[in-house]
Image: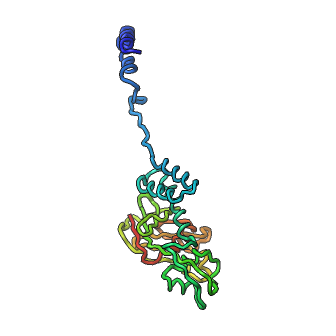
Amino acid sequence: MNNLVKLLIVASLATSVFGGGGFVAYRLFFQGPDRFGIGNQPVVTPTPDPGIVMYDQAKQQMTSGDRSESEKMLLALIQSFPDSVRANEARKLLGDLNISEFFSPAPGPDRTEYTVMRGDSIAKIATKTKAPAELIFKANGLDSLTIQPGRRLIVPKGQFTLVIDTKRKDVTLMNNGFFFRWYQPLEVKLPPKFARGQFKMREKIAWSGGVRVAFGEKKYLGSSRWIVINDSGITLYSETNPQTPNIEKPGTGVLLSAADMEELFALVVKETPVIVK
């Protein structure tokens, strides 16, 4: 329809309805599609979320066997689009890949091999290697504290920093300054006043029946774990049996699942750097 024909239609409508139809016809034929919704309100176009496409691509790469490229894509997603609707899924998946690699029995730069000697115990090996006893136990899939001489144990090591994001309400573990693992709390209850900044982990505690227990004691398995950050009231904790708790939960803190807390408890040591932001 050329402009001359459009103009004739506008003139005809204007004559028949005293100009009102002419205005409508003008907007229809000359002004283009109306970008206003009901009540002359602007129509909001949703902002595209690149993280959705990146996450799908990462999963496709994983399915095709290209783990390295998948990891790069997931890391790029959480760094460039931390608020994407797929960001937490990316954090979880990348963390799963990292922890699987960390506990792998294959040789690697972050793993050393230790041959058990006569008279050794997990605690003694932990002292020799400066690795948490819980980490050695978990990394080697042990179900008993009894170890035989000659057995080869994998001792993974990391340079960890714990990041507690009070705005996003999550916990991230960094290794050598890079993303390593992400934990979604079950509950976050922050004190009215707390200090943000850099700290060092003050204490790791295992509770059973209201009493502190140490690694190697019978009651250690199934104990509830606490990681005390500082005196401002931020404590990471878990409860293995909510029906009959091992200890009354702290008034404020970050509650993790028992499985997440058991893993985190094994990875970090006292004096681990902590960032509260």
* Number of on-image labels: 0
Residue sitting nearer the eye, 208 or 53: 53
Residue 238 left/right relative to 49: right
- Give percent across and percent down for residue 249: 52, 70
Q: Residue at x 60, y 83 (%)?
A: 217
Question: Which image quadrant for residue 19?
Answer: top left
**Residue shown at 37%/66% (left/top)?**
193
Residue 88 in picture, x, y percent from top left? 49, 56
**From the image, which quarter does the N terminus lie in?**
top left
Q: Decide if residue 226 is in sight here.
A: no
114 sits to left or right of 228: right
Of residue 182 and residue 241, the one placed in the foreground of this image is: 182
Q: Is residue 2 in view from this perspective?
A: yes
Render colour scheme: rainbow
With 163 as the anchor, is 114 left or right in this view? right
Horizontal and vertical percent for residue 66?
54, 57
Does 24 appear above or below 56?
Answer: above
Q: Is residue 23 above or below residue 132?
A: above
Residue 169 lies, with reference to residue 47, above or below; the image says below
Q: Residue at x 39, y 30 (%)?
A: 35
Residue at the bottom extreme, as displayed:
119
Q: Nearer the viewer, residue 128 or 106?
A: 106
User: Residue 82 placed where, x, y %?
Assistant: 43, 54
Judge left or right: residue 216 versus residue 28. Answer: right
The quarter in which the C terminus is drawn is: bottom left
Quadrant position of residue 169: bottom left
